[in-house]
Image (spheres, rainbow, N blue to C red):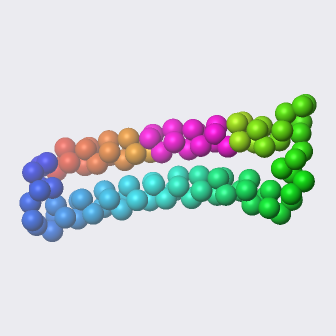
């Protein structure tokens, strides 16, 4: 049934297009929060310039936000993306085996 993907018929095209749509959905579900997170801090520093010079326990707030506030959520989003993509591929392979 794997050969159906490479056949120029409607079934193979539909299988591939549904997989690509699902992959695009997963990508957007992760990309939009990541972009929002990356835009949030520069936007806050433009709106509140004092935020850029503020320090907590002797460390600049910028360092704390960039080191502890942005990278861990981005790593988490990357992890979630990989898990979702693997589950999507696994379901797709199961669908092919059923046919």
Instruction: Answer whether residue 37 is magenta in the image.
Output: no
In percent of the image, x 86 and y 57: which residue is there?
49
Instruction: Answer whether residue 75 is magenta in the image.
Output: yes
How many numbered markers are drawn? 0
Q: Nearer the viewer, residue 13 or 69?
A: 69
**Where are the magenta residues, as a range?**
70-83
In percent of the image, x 89 and y 45: which residue is there?
54
Instruction: Report the predominant secondary structure element of the magenta stretch.
Output: helix
Does residue 63 sit above or below 88 in this rendering? Answer: above
In percent of the image, x 67 and y 43: which residue is there?
70
Tell me if 15 is positioned left or right of 34 in this view. Answer: left
Does residue 65 sit above or below 47 in this rendering? Answer: above
Extreme residue toward the top, this view = 57
Q: Where residue 28 sits: x, y (%)?
A: 49, 59
Does residue 45 sit above or below 93 in this rendering? Answer: below
Residue 40's quadrant in the figure?
A: bottom right
């Amino acid at each position: 049934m794997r050969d159906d993907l490479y056949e120029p018929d409607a079934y193979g095209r539909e299988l591939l297009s549904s997989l690509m749509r699902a992959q695009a959905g997963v990508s957007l579900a992760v990309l939009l929060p990541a972009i929002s997170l990356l835009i949030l801090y520069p936007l806050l520093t433009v709106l509140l310039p004092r935020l850029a010079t503020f320090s907590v326990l002797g460390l600049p707030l910028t360092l704390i936000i960039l080191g502890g506030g942005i990278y861990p959520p981005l790593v988490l989003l990357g992890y979630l993306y990989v898990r979702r993509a693997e589950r999507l591929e696994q379901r797709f392979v199961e669908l092919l085996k059923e046919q």
